[in-house]
Amino acid sequence: MNKSEQLFEQAQQVIPGGVNSPVRAFNGVGGVPCFIKRAEGAYIFDADDNAYIDYVGSWGPMILGHNHPAILDAVISTAKNGLSFGAPTEVEITMANKVRELVPSMESLRMVSSGTEATMSAIRLARGYTGRDKILKFEGCYHGHADSLLVKAGSGALTMGVPNSPGIPADFAQHTLTVSFNNIDEVKAIFAKYPEDIACIIVEPVAGNMNCIPPVEGFLEGLREVCNQYNSVLIFDEVMTGFRVALGGAQAHYNIKPDLTTLGKVIGGGMPVGAFGGKQEIMDYIAPIGPVYQAGTLSGNPLAMSAGLASLTELAQGEKHAQLSASTEKLAMGLKAAAERNGVDLSVNYVGGMFGFFFTNDSAPITSYAQATACDADLFKRFFHLMLAEGVYLAPSAFETGFVSTAHSDEIIEKTLAAADKCFAQL
Ligand code: PMP
């Protein structure tokens, strides 16, 4: 038994499924998860000292690569002054200003400790602001595990085939309306049916929790128009896309201004952080100035703020996003070419530093949940394990997005493609 196998056995004795977040258990691909000991740049190292090129990046935050010196220094020097005070600190202002500078639609914002908290709070705020109960989300989009949002959800919920989780009262779930991603006609139809009941639309502007599905032309614009027409709040969940598809997030890339934005992961540089923010008029509904209650003992924690600030400051320097996009394109197109060479049908999607690949002979671009879920997940499982054996760590599910970092050099991408060539040949 290797070390990861031993640790997984021990973990299962004391932690449900041996993991603190479901997808980590490799349910989507089978086998024993790699227990990670350390990471550096584009590489992670498991408990048995195997090195892997990492395309998970802690599910997004490691956009500058692992263990980036600027982030590490910020955390260490901040820690020396104390870990948490439960009182305001100056770094929270600097961080809020930094986020607003990069995402100007967030006129005012509040820090939380996870993406789930960010989306849950944004939805409560939208409901409080509009006085409406219903929300609209899209099948296969994942916005964390708050009750309203685990209805037809993506990510681990989709991987495990339980998109509607038990434990959520039907009375509650009935307020969550769900339509197809990239289908503006369905959105219009549901608003026509409930013209005065829908508090908000929440959307991943590039869906990243049913593999990677960019918006089709006109979809995000259509959502903006519908929200304007019905006085509903448009929430962009940029937990994945923020600072990743462009420095200003998907809203900058597609040039659409949401009313509220939720952020997570990336703004913590690896520490637990999230944020929600947007139009001042809406944000003024939040306690203590407004009636909608929202709070957090560790919100705006100094270590998390310093790590996030260092990460965003570094990201905003130079041509990082041009590099990220170029590396991601090279990887995605290279995977497609390698698959073709080996007679494997593969479709790829990518935007900025996000990519996805689908084992399918569907010749149309993959733009829907139905197409994504119709892909050959068994072939993905085999490919995943072959790549792992070659030292490439992909997201352990056919329904997750891949993440490239600025530490993924051309040489590392080429190494990945050489491994892929070998693995496609064995499928
Ligand atoms: N929104 C999106 C788009 C996400 O991808 C995720 C997590 N993958 C969340 C929200 C929830 O974030 P967290 O896991 O930090 O609660």
Image: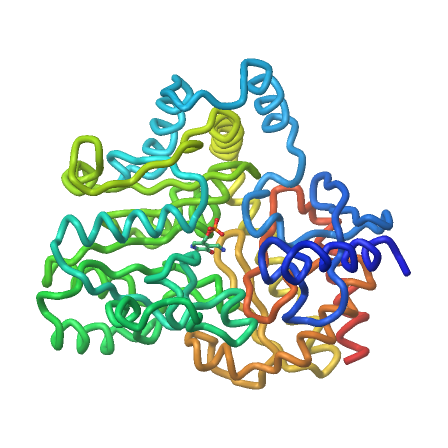
Answer with left or right where residue 13 lies relative to residue 184. right
> Closer to the camera, 60 or 300?
300
Quarter occupied by residue 192: bottom left
| 303 versus 370 height, above or below | above
Taking the spot 18% from the left edge, 78% from the top edge, the residue there is: 189
Q: Kindly identify the residue that appears in the image at 24 percent across and 63 percent down.
A: 135
Towards the viewer: 354 or 384? 384
Across and down, in percent, residue 404 comes to 60, 51
Q: Say above or below: 335 vs 414.
A: below
At which x and y percent is residue 152? 40, 72
Placement of 236 over or under 336, stated as above or below: above
Snapshot quadrant of residue 143: bottom left
Residue under the image location 59 percent in, 39 percent down: 64
Residue 158 place in picture, x, y as percent: 50, 72
In this picture, is 323 found above or below 195?
above
Between 53 and 160, the residue placed more toward the observer is 160
Nearer to me, 125 or 310: 125
